[in-house]
Image (spheres, rainbow, N blue to C red):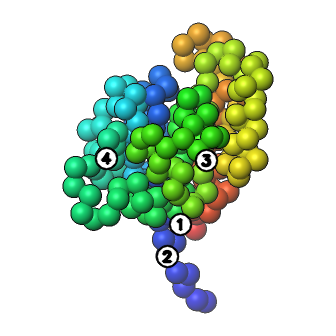
Amino acid sequence: MTEQEPVRPRRVLVVITGSIMAAFMPTWISLIRAELRCVVQVLLTESAAELVSAQALSALTGRPIAGPAWRADQSGGAEHVVLAQWAEIVVVVPATMNFCAKLTVGLCDDLASTTVHSATAPTVLVPSLPTGCLAKPATRRVLGTLSEDGHLLVRGTATSVTTGEQESGGPGTIDDLIGALITLGVAPVSALAT
């Protein structure tokens, strides 16, 4: 019998944008770290920083939080490049319509969008769109373009946090995201016990 090499944790960059769903990200980060063999680095947009505690996220990941602005000290390299090269998988959750639209046209006007555009790693997006937004042709074009560009969209039937309504095509669940990460090669912790 030969011993298997230990599974190296994957490096997952989680970009949190400014949807109310950002308030749930400490729980999601905890579940990702409990379920998957990965190291998580969080990057906040300016609007996300108003909705979720950077201190809580740092405590849960054991790492300093990046963003929303570039650090003053860039002596270790341009921050967006360092983050993009570090990431083996990029997850944008929640991915607001604004952020999704930026990605489709290549707009890089902040640390988060510039980092995601600079990354060569697979990108997983969990869109969190306003209720009714999916009925708009522009929204369908944006999501279609993201998919055509190779981004993995994690969508499902979810209950809107703001209205309580069920909406098909809404954000995926944490289980949907964990499933997508496993598909991309992140080992479940349970697989290590066998």
N-terminal-most mark, 4 or 3:
4
Residue at 40 percent of width and 45 percent of height = 111
Label 4: few (<14), some (14–19) or many (≥20) C-alpha neighbours in 10 Å: some
Instruction: State the CA–CA distance, disc 2 to disc 3.
Output: 25 Å
Read off the residue under disc 3.
Answer: 124
Read off the residue under disc 2.
Answer: 6
Query: Please, which residue is most extreme toward the bottom here?
Result: 1
Read off the residue under disc 4.
Answer: 70
Tell me if I can see residue 132 in this picture: yes
N-terminal-most mark, 1 or 3:
3
Q: Amino acid at mark 4?
A: Trp
Read off the residue under disc 1.
Answer: 192
Label 1: few (<14), some (14–19) or many (≥20) C-alpha neighbours in 10 Å: few
Q: Are marks 4 and 1 in contact (CB under 8 Å)?
A: no
Q: Which mark is residue 164?
A: none
Determine which quarter of the picture holds residue 139: top right
Instruction: State the CA–CA distance, disc 4 to disc 1.
Output: 37 Å
Q: Residue 179 placed where, x, y %?
A: 65, 49
Q: Residue 44 placed where, x, y %?
A: 39, 39
Give the number of the mark in front: 2 or 3.
3
Left or right? Give the position of 184 relative to 75.
Answer: right
Give the number of the mark in front: 4 or 3.
4
Q: Are marks 1 and 2 in contact (CB under 8 Å)?
A: yes
N-terminal-most mark, 2 or 4:
2
Determine which quarter of the picture holds residue 120: bottom right
